[in-house]
Structures are given as structure tokens and as C-alpha cells.
Image: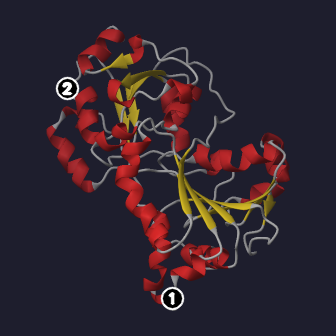
Amino acid sequence: MKIAIIRFNQNWVLCKENFTETSGGWEDLYSLIKTPIERGHDVTLYTEAKDAYVLKDKNTLNKYEYLKKLKYKPDSYIDEDTDFLIIHNASTNMMYSRKDKIPFILWTYNLLKNYKGLVFYINVDFELPFTFNILTKIGDLPFLHCIHPNDIFIDKYYVICSKVTRNFDKFLEDYNNGVNLYKDLGYPVEYIDGSFWGFSEDVLEISEKCQTDLIYGGSDKSGRIKKIVKYFDNLPEEVTCDIYGKWSTKTKECIKKYKINKYYRGSIQRKFLLEKYNKSLCTVMFDSDKLESYGVLQTRLYELISCRILVFFDRNILPSKEYLRFDIDEKFIIESQEELLAKIQF
């Protein structure tokens, strides 16, 4: 099949060495291109890649063989004979621009206006605003004042895909309003629950000596701080701990009253965070109450597995076995800091 791929409002990254964001996301970009190419499909990327130069670098292409087969057309409209288009959602910041200064939101609009086929919209992050909605309000932007949603949605069939959840009904309770918006306007839209990411090919060697006992990496969104306090605050003096994340000024002020403040190391690029994971004894997987109620299977789990770090699971976040393909032993499930410390023998 002939597949087109774009990123909604941001550039693409082809190699993880060039992925400088402080949070996750590499697995999504990696898998959306690699998986269909390795299954014999014809894949074209229509979004500008900030590291497009690697497509001409022999050493990079020898490391990432699938990139040799990727077609790259950042300045073209989508070919008419394309079987379907995949949109990867990204930041809702409409100030991002291409190298030629054209706003990404405008470029996305032009691509969609001139494409009439099937669209799979990948909503990769439950915590991001539903960026698809921006397209129905695109006429509010000064440089797009004459645009109507019909220019974008007509003659297309949209399938909106989200990460795997154990409780999809609960997710739809919160997000159905967005889906119904398009249905009310007469646009055909479906919502499906599906996993589309995969492992990075690099699995690190097990470190002979750990530099840190406990580690956590993640943003401060949606109430995660109370979980960080639950597991990492007021640790015994002999326990070492490092916490990384891009946190707001408000959060940084808030944590000053807790002892986790002395463990917070600030934000860190993802590639360096993975090295820190690899040299630490263990971490804990948890999320906000909202996401835990959906039972989201996080891509962070795959990152941790590839880093060869011991992973404990908060009981509320346990993903379904049918998606994991393996059981999680009870010894790795915890509900308190005391239980965590007991299991790592502190």
C-alpha cells in the first residue's frame, strides 16, 4: 500500500540521536515509519524533518536500514494515488514554523485541503489537548481568516486512534465530545483503540554497578506530583534518588515543602535520561488518576525495558496482559513507599 505520513504541527525527527525533547515520543515517530516499511509498504513523509540530512549520510543509513526506503517530500502535496494518510499529533503551539517560515499549522491545512482520501489521526498523548479540534477553528487565525472546516474535512473519512487502554469506555466518556463535534457537522469519524509503537532496536547492557537506587523521569502534568511525593518523599538517608522532568515554576515552588526537592535534577534530554535509567537500580511506573482510570499502556514501559532497569508498578496502573504479552509478578506490584523499600531490601 502507499502510505503518507505527516506530523500535525511540528517537525519530524528521523534518528533518535537527534531527538532532543525532554519527554518520550521517539517510539511513536520511529514505529510509524519503520513498521510499514518493513512490511513492504511504500511510505512517504510529507512533514519537514529537522534532521533530513541523515537521508544522505551512509553511516546513518547503514544503522537505520529502513530509512533507505523512505520517500521524503516535505514541499509537495500528498500524491493522489495514496491509499491513506497518517497524522501524528504534536504540540498545539501554533507558532512553530518550517525552515521557510511557513507555519506548520498552515502547511498542515494546505496538505489536508488538497487530499481527499482516508485519514488515520494518531492521538499519541491523552494529556495533550485534542489538536484535531484546532482544525475546526482554524478560521480564527489571522493568516487563515477565509478558511472553513469544510475545506478540510469534506470528502475524507477520519479514523482517530489512541493508545491502548484497559477502560476504553471511561476514556470515551471524557473524549466523546470531540468525536461528536465532527459527527454533528456531518463528517464521518470513528474512534479506535490501538497500539502502534514498538521497541527501539537498541537494548542497553546491564550495568555492573548502579549509581543511584531510585530514579524517576517525567513531567509534572495532571497530578503526577502527588504520586512522586508518595513514593519518593522523605526517603531514608542511605537511599539515593534522582528525579528528572520539565516542571513548571509553580510545581518547583510547590515541592520546596517536600524532601523530594533535594532529589529534583531538572529537565534532561531523553537520550541522557535513558543512560541514567541504565545506571540506576529501579523506578516506579504510575500516572495521574485520570490516566490510570483509562488503564493506559505507556510507551515509557518499553523505554525502561530496553534500559535494563528494575520496574515496579503502582497497582492502579497495571496494564492488561493481552497488550503486554506477559504476566507481571506480584513481587513487582506496590502500593506504598514502605513496600517499595522492603522489596529492594532497604
From the image, tell me which residue sits under label 2: 234
- Examine the rendered structure and indicate whether residue 39 appears above or below residue 278: below
Circle 1 sits in a helix, a strand or a loop, which is it?
helix
Left or right: residue 233 compared with residue 310: left
Relative to the observer, which residue lies in front, 96 or 71? 71
Q: Which amino acid does label 1 sit on?
A: Phe
Relative to the observer, which residue lies in front, 202 or 179? 179
> Which residue shows up at 55% across the image and 32% down it?
302
Residue that protrudes farthest toward the top in the picture = 345
Task: Count every numbered label the image shows and give the total.
Answer: 2
Q: Residue 61: image x %, image y %?
A: 82, 47
Relative to the observer, which residue lies in front, 119 or 52? 119
From the image, tell me which residue sits under label 1: 143
Q: Residue 157: image x %, image y %?
A: 63, 65
- Examine the rendered structure and indicate whether residue 332 appears above or below residue 108: above
Circle 2 sits in a helix, a strand or a loop, which is it?
loop
Q: Residue 304: image x %, image y %?
A: 52, 29
Query: If you read the primary sequence from the N terminus, does the residue marked by circle 1 or circle 2 appear first?
Result: 1
Residue that protrudes farthest toward the bottom in the picture = 146
Residue 132 in sight in this render: yes
- Examine the rendered structure and indicate whether residue 117 appears above or below residue 205: below
Residue 97 in sight in this render: no
Q: Residue 262: image x %, image y %?
A: 25, 35
Q: What residue type is labelled 2?
A: Asn
